[in-house]
Amino acid sequence: MKYQSAFLKDRKGRKGWTGYLKFKDGDGRWRECSRSLKAATKTEARRELASWRAEMEDAAEREAEARTDALGTRAEVPDYVAGMVDRLEASGAIEPSTASGYRTTVNHIRRRFTGVTVADLTAAEVQAWEADLTASGLGSSTVGKCHRLLKQAMKEACALDLIKRNPLDAVRPPKRRPVHEGINALDLDGRTRLLDALDAMELTPVTVGARVALYTGLRRGEVCGLRWADIDPEAGVLWVRRSIGKGGYVKDPKTGKGRDVALPPSLAAALADWRAFMEEAYRAAGAVLPRTAYVLGYGDRFMSPELLGKQWATLAGALGIRGTEGRIPTFHDLRHTWATLYLAAGGDVKTAASNLGHADVSMTLNTYASADPDAKRRAAVLVEGAMRAPEGAAVPFRARGEAV
């Protein structure tokens, strides 16, 4: 088991510190455990807390391995799958947020296969189960997750010689139905209304966060993970070094490595104003704003991505803005807006992929190549002009493909 966060509290009226570890139980509910620390200073307390956290996670990993070894082929299918998820999380192979999603999937497996051992599971049973899940109204994506997780667990059982063959190798995964929801980026009217509103409003974490996402294309968790040390206004650069995961824990950016993003002058100015505001707040409290403080948080406390998303939803709803798909834009749609606007303006795909933190340009192309409605209209006019033109004749067009 991985603990999503660890934090300290001083003992009121007494010297010393108490360490807390926060985690989600098997039902997805938040829990915490605590321990009185022997350290005399906060620096020592942090080291002791980190050591305790490592000990607890190592013990959880050993317990998960022992539980699986003891069960073997006698394990019921849901227990075996749940044990695999525990081991993956304890070893750091998957994020806590991923483990939480897997445990939701385990609940579907548990409802059908409680009482069925790993050795007795058959392809026919799995096929009937997936058909029933689909008939009950579950989407193809959810049924597919159930299929893949169960197949992964049985593949592990094969590798451990608990079963001779994986029954899911004979089961065809459910066909994924296409989702026709398009990219809900902001058009010119939406961008103008949003920026005018932000200019008229006081600076707050949500308004600053919205500007960062709109002008850089950062993910919500990456925005929450920014520290003041990551911003260099003179060089015009912003470094993405960490992200805040769902549930409140610090992790590496999605592609596993950091990246630098250009800092536009207007965003740099807004961040300078926000920094001045925060410096004054620290002075009023008799402190100095540290470079390690989170931009949208206070000190070593970050703003959670969930809270940022909720505050943005409230703001967007109050402003009455809509995206190109007619829906109220989510915070992630600000990232979509940056990408579609950059590509529509003639930006190259490789730079867009780097800025967005995509693993490769194919992901960028697959997501945004046809997301701009204006680009589609320009393409239609261009093809119409070429339709009756003599073969080999040049079709006049303006810069970036706009037909004359």
Image (cartoon, grey):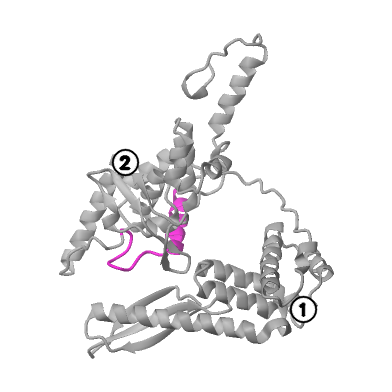
Residue 157 horizontal side relative to residue 325, left or right: right
Disc marking residue 119: 1
At label 1, the amino acid type is Ala
Residue appearing at x 80%, y 78% in the figure: 120
- Whether residue 76 is visible here, answered yes or no, is yes
Q: Give the range drawn in magenta.
A: 295-319
Dot 1 falls on a residue whose secondary structure is: helix
Disc marking residue 264: 2
- Whether residue 341 is visible here, answered yes or no, is no
Residue 367 horizontal side relative to residue 124, left or right: left
- 133 and 43: which one is in front? 43
Q: Residue 125 lies in what quarter of the image?
A: bottom right
At label 2, the amino acid type is Pro
Residue 390 horizontal side relative to residue 329, left or right: right
Residue appearing at x 33%, y 59% in the figure: 296
Q: Position of residue 278 (x, y in %)?
A: 23, 59
Q: In this view, does 249 lie above or below 232?
A: below
Residue appearing at x 51%, y 43% in the figure: 185
Q: Where is residue 234 in the image (x, y as percent from the top left)?
A: 22, 44
Our reading of the magenta stretch's main secondary structure is: helix
Q: Position of residue 27 (x, y in %)?
A: 58, 78
- 293 and 156: which one is in front? 156
Badge 1: residue crowd in 10 Å (few <14, some 14–19, many ≥20): many
Confirm or deny contact between disc 1 and disc 2 (CB under 8 A). no
